Image: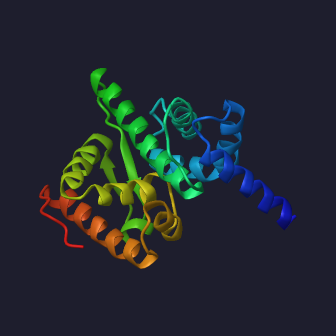
Amino acid sequence: MADSNDNRGGEITEIIQHWSSVSDDAKGRVVAALYEQLRRNAASHLRGEAHVDLQPTSLVHEAYDRLVNISRIDLNSRSHFLGLAGRVMRQVLVDEARRRRAQKRDVGLQTQFTEKFFGEEVQYADILELEEMLGELEQIDPLYVSLFEARAFAGMTVEETAVSLGMSASTVKRRWKVVLAWLRIRMESGQGGEPSP
């Protein structure tokens, strides 16, 4: 059984490494292999949003449709793929929030930050406000945003994030704390400032 899993993991990695040139069927196998992780993470962003048209399954499917249509992409591993999937899921949520705003609905689209991020009570952030904050953070250092996408949108572990971003696990942990502290201050006070690594 372990050999079978190893073989499948090798196949998935090979498909990811040749993403731009493989068939849609092959790409579908990658998404199928990572589907539960992606869906769990999508569900965490949409929890409590029963009125939202976009459900976890459709969020993953929309992200997949966008990934399939990226013509040029350079991926080396499962971690790189998950990082890109996190970025795409962020874009899907932002597009959905903008669509809702354009329709002048009363309720915005929020995402949920669980205790695993802030180590305390569950916090919520309006998707478009979060996008604005991430835009500010990107001006400070784009790597902070990539780190946030990997951990918060793709649901990646510290180790997966380290592989994806080419840094040590200890650096990921340190910078993750900085990102969360900056976001917490920004959400509570509306003031950003520049995070210190």
Query: In the shown orientation, is residue 61 left or right of residue 113?
Result: right
Let me know if residue 146 appears in the view: yes
Q: Residue furthest top?
A: 103
Residue 26: x and y, percent? 71, 38
Number of callouts = 0
Q: Nearer the viewer, residue 181 or 189?
A: 181
Above-or-below relation of 89 to 195: above
Query: In the shown orientation, is residue 142 left or right of residue 150?
Result: left
Q: Nearer the viewer, residue 167 or 181?
A: 167
Above-or-below relation of 132 to 54: below
Q: Nearer the viewer, residue 26 or 98?
A: 26
Colour scheme: rainbow
Instruction: Assign the C terminus to one quadrant of the image.
Output: bottom left
Let me know if residue 47 appears in the view: no
Query: In the shown orientation, is residue 190 left or right of residue 6?
Result: left
At x 28% / y 48%, what residue is drawn? 130
Res 79 quadrant in image: bottom right
Q: Residue furthest right?
A: 1
Residue 30: x and y, percent? 67, 45
Residue 90: x and y, percent? 40, 43
At x 42% / y 46%, what residue is drawn? 87
Above-or-below relation of 156 to 39: below
Residue 153: x and y, percent? 45, 51
Instruction: Assign the N terminus to one quadrant of the image.
Output: bottom right
Query: In the shown orientation, is residue 158 left or right of residue 2?
Result: left
